[in-house]
Image (cartoon, helix red, strand yellow):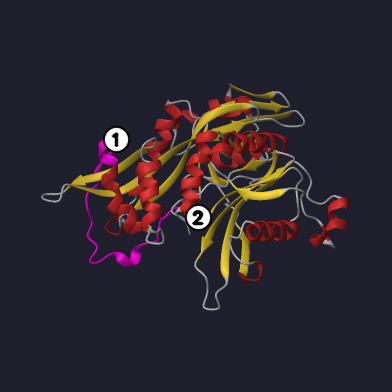
Amino acid sequence: MKATGIAAAAADALSKGKHNMRDGQIRYLKQWEKQRTRSMYEMMFPEDSKAFVDYYYQWKIEENEVIVMEEAGPVQGPFFHVMIHLNPYILWCAGQQMQIPYLVAVATHPDCRRQGKMGQVMGQVLRDLEKKHTPFTFLLPANSVYYLGLGFVYFPCNNQSKISQYTERQTLRAAQADSFLPEGTWQKASGETLSELAAFSNQILKERYDIFITRDKFYYERLLQETAVEEGGVLLLKKEGYVCGLLVYAMEKGDSEGRCKAQVKELLLEEEVLEEEAELICSKALSEVKVAKKEHLDVKLVSSEMMVRIASLREFVPWIRSKNQRNFYVKVTDSIVEANNGCFWITTNRKGGKIQKIPKEQVTRKIDISMLAQELLNESSVYLNEWV
């Protein structure tokens, strides 16, 4: 699994003679201090190659925030009990652009497990985000049960388009999937094509999804570096001089029989395709640009199931859309972010949402912040498929 996954329990075997350490100081690291987390990162995420970690600490540390619980050691210097990286992304949320943190490299040192320390640090993150008027945050869980206890829930419609996947036309096509191939020529993306890729992907994603990460030239510049350390890359499909498709992939080590394995993180085309068609298209595209010989290439489509957590309920509600008028007369409970607690009237429609306080006599039910997130998002199509 990529380092974007959450290592809540990945390194128990590394612990030797656990001891109960007192709670340390929780703080955000200064820019020059962030490199000090690398040794903990490498210990907690051993599946990531040195090349990938080099990429991460060159490209991501520059712009993100890192919060830790630390205890000063007598000789070695700071000892980190817990760390969480907040990597900023600009998300398109139902017509609005918002900077939202993606929580990655969430880890607890093996000697500090099962002492409630991660919960303390995550609580600080959520309260700080609420004070900054940040609507929500999201992460890719390794252990969803742990994050459910912190108020995170899976996006109800994660990586599901607003366009139906089961039309009659698609059903007919499924029976002859190998007959559908997009027109055009696949080629490797370069620095000169990044702006074209951004324009194409943003247009397609706006048509199909309510929530997604917006793309620009820098997004694809970084992505080229990210996939390169995984022996992968970004391909674009051109027809009559215009971009009409893109494919993002990474390569796994081949097996003893010499077969190559490609993990396809993203395939965007002008027309949506079924999974069977997507696998065929990816295989032919990768063969066309000579990533590997067709007969020795296995393709696997990768989809990330993200979890979401409301940080500021008052900022979250206004951008929520629904086809029909919905009304909630609720008492909201949030055990971590006190500002989210209270009795509210919440309404949503096609134009957005509204929230205002009401007397407790008007409340019709009590609801936890996580369950409210699920209900509010159940009509929002989401496309979040990042690694880090």
Residue 241 appearing in the image: yes
Say what amino acid the circle numbered 2 marks. Val
Residue 178 lies, in percent from the top left, at 79, 62
Image position of 19 with respect to 66: above or below: below
Q: For the point 63% across and 49% down, which residue is it?
A: 187
Q: Nearer the viewer, mark 2 or mark 1?
A: 1
Residue 343 location, quadrant: top right
Residue 241 lies, in percent from the top left, at 71, 38
In depth, the one of 352 and 228 nearer the eye is 228
Residue 307 lies, in percent from the top left, at 54, 46
Whether the magenta-drawn stretch holds residue 211 is answered as no
Q: For the point 39% across and 48% down, which residue is it?
A: 55
- Residue at the disc numbered 2: 145
Most extreme residue toward the bottom, as rendered?
257
Whether the magenta-drawn stretch holds residue 32 is answered as yes
> Secondary structure under badge 1?
helix
Image position of 267 with respect to 210: above or below: below
Residue 336 location, quadrant: top left
> In the picture provided, is 66 more to the left or to the right than 235?
left
Residue 365 lies, in percent from the top left, at 63, 36
C-alpha gap between disc 2 and disc 1: 33 Å
Q: For the point 30% across and 65% down, which residue is it?
A: 14
Query: Which residues lie in the magenta part?
Result: 5-34
- Residue at the disc numbered 1: 31
Q: How many marks?
A: 2
> Secondary structure under badge 2?
helix
